[in-house]
Amino acid sequence: MEPIILDGTVVAKQIKDGLKGRVENLRAKGITPCLATILVGGDPASETYVRMKGNACSRLGISSKRVHLPKETTTIALLDEINKLNEDPQIHGILLQHPVPGDIDERAAFEAIDLEKDVDGVTSATFGRTALGLSGFPSCTPKAIMTILDYYNITIEGQNAVVIGRSPILGKPVSALLLNRDATITTCHSKTKDIDKIVQNADIVVAAVGKPKFVQGSWIKQGAIILDAGYNEGNIGDVDYDACLTQASAITPVPGGVGPVTIATLLSHTVEAAERSAGKNE
């Protein structure tokens, strides 16, 4: 049986189509949802990501404010810029493009973002709410992974899920989201022994390790579901796609898998933040 290709562009389109009317309703009230993106330095990949997010906003009628700071920016100066955005009622979401230059305390910068504007799900408070299953804005890529699973009616309850990666904005929160949906979770990382044998027991594999073609076809049991959250130079994911395709029952491609849904999730969170703000002011 041919594997199902989990097409993220289809999922993203459904999300964005559902946002159009909500954006129109807000604009009819004189409110334009606005996402502020902060870029520190001139990393070409980061500049591309910020531009893509800005273009995605404009296509939906969402405003975007770009704050571009030099790489010499200090932590204190960055915190000052974040606080200005926190205090601006016209800004509904704040995204700090990461990674930031090494001299900056990235965690301090994330923590400075107002919880109600943390549409990228990077604060520790948001992570805590995600882990406890409370309302808030989960990190966008983990939420995108869950959205893809739900769109394709993939069973999560009772499944053995292996997450490869433990970053605070991807591996850890997606493990929490899967656990909250009654999957049994194993989180692997750079110190995990015999990772190939652990993955061989997985019904669902989430690859979020940041290494091209890290997950091998021999690791995948027949019929497993693979979600590749990696994006490496040359449009290569963290999964050896061709080798794993023969084993999987469903798999996300790179590009065109998790990535488009991540951006659509960011837009959805921004619109929801604007709606919440509007509700408070009515």
Image: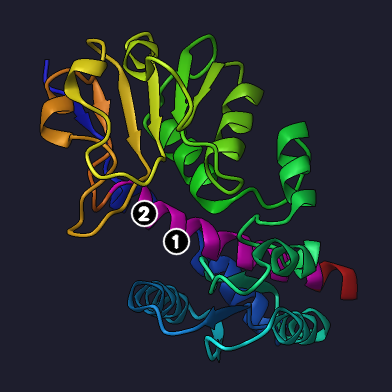
Q: Is residue 93 magenta?
A: no
Q: Residue at x 45, y 21 (%)?
A: 162
Which quadrant of the figure has residue 248?
top left
Vertical placement of 100 versus 261: above or below? Answer: below
- Let me know if residue 137 appears in the view: yes
Q: Classify the position of the C terminus by image quarter.
A: bottom right
- Let me know if residue 282 appears in the view: no
Q: Which residues are magenta?
A: 257-277
Q: Pointer 1: what residue?
A: 263
Which sits in the foreground, 39 or 12? 39
Vertical placement of 54 versus 275: above or below? Answer: below
Q: Pointer 2: what residue?
A: 259
Element on which disc 2 rests? helix
Alpha-carbon neighbours of circle 1 within 10 Å: few (<14), some, or many (≥20)?
many
Q: Residue at x 57, y 88 (%)?
A: 72
For badge 2, the amino acid type reads Gly
Element on which disc 1 rests? helix
Residue 259 placement (x, y as % from top left): 36, 54
Residue 216 placement (x, y as % from top left): 21, 26
Q: Residue at x 54, y 81 (%)?
A: 40
For badge 1, the amino acid type reads Ile
